[in-house]
Amino acid sequence: MTERTPRDGHAPRAELTPPELRVLLAVCDAHGFTAAADALGLTQSAVSHAVRGIERKLGAVLFERGRKGATPTPAGERAAAHARRILRLYEAMAAEVRGAPDGSLTGPLRVAAFRSAALHLLPDALERLARRHPGLAPEVRVVRDVGRGTAGEVADGRADLAIATLGGTTPLPEGLVTGDLAEEAYSFVHPAGHPDPRSLPFVDWTENCSAYTAGWWSAQDWLPRATVTAEDDGTVLALVARGRGMAVMPELSLRDAPPAVQIADLGPGRPTRRIGYATTPELARTAAVRALIRELRAGRITGP
């Protein structure tokens, strides 16, 4: 389906109300009008009527209707992302207007993070945040650091702030506000006490940021191509600990590495990667997001 414009040639008036935005998201999330109606406590005909009105206002077809339900079109996906972000701003506005006299913050705070950041950067920051603002309710989503990754959750309105890798080959979604939190070094890891660790198979995982290691990697004639691909960095560590391979891994992935894993410095030319945050320009101004960024920066790791 293609986007459509009114017959008079003028742009449509996209003045959607919050209830209309909620209907749009319910259909998008449920992939159907009947399921959306059940979730909203409405009739199926009321939801269908509302979606037709939304499409007229926006001048675009938002859903492909079929026997198996309703699938968002590209225009529908974009509309849903805007709807999530708009409704989140309503919540943020209410939370800030109701702010306690002592400056403490309340309400949800949605965070998306890749696995090692969720394990080793977020907990201390959230603990400090909870002491200062016990009324805040953080919600953490662990998202694989591939494709649009954690920043895509923010762009799509599913998270307020993402912890993301910055400066890689995959650009972040446009329009986000970013900032650095940490720089971490890569190290060579192998089974402790192994007489010849470089003879072991090389183990890697999909999320490993090859953009940060590519230049360094090409100069290392002792490193073979990966012959074992694991699900995540935790699985890589487990394989190395059991003597099944060697790996090159970033610092966060090596926090709490078991004693059976030996970590070796790769020297002054070792690769590093940047870890930062990403949020929207609107949410970057909210007190809750600013408070979380402060706590993340207070506990940042430092590179070489």
Image (tube, rainbow, N blue to C red):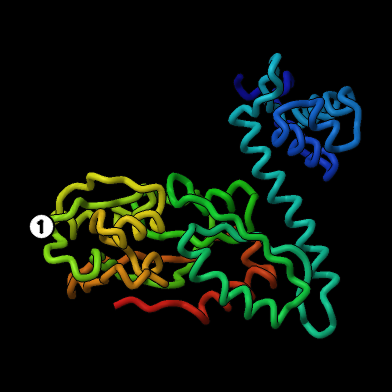
> In the displayed structure, does residue 72 sit left or right of residue 32?
left
Q: Residue 155, relative to residue 128: is it above or below?
A: above
Residue at 26% over, 68% down: 187
Q: On the picture, is 221 further left or further right than 61?
A: left
Residue appearing at x 41%, y 60% in the figure: 166
Residue 238 or residue 202, whichever sits in front? 238
Report the side of 42 relative to 158 (left or right).
Answer: right
Out of 118 and 270, give the one closest to the viewer: 118
Binning the other alpha carbons within 10 Å of mark 1 as few (below 14), some (14 to 19) or many (20 upward) gives few
The image shows residue 204 at horizontal and vertical percentages of 30, 51
Quadrant assignment, res 35? top right
Q: Where does the N terminus fall, quadrant-wise? A: top right
**Depicted 110 relative to depicted 66: above or below:** below
- In the image, farthest residue toward the top: 67
Query: Which image quadrant is residue 55 in?
Result: top right
- Residue at the spot x=12%, y=63% of the render? 196
Image coords of residue 106 (percent x, y) = 78, 71
Which secondary structure lies at badge 1?
loop
The residue at which mark 1 appears reads as 222
Closest to the observer, 19 or 71: 71
**In the image, what residue type sits under mark 1?**
Trp
Residue 142, given in percent of the width and then of the height, sits at 55, 55
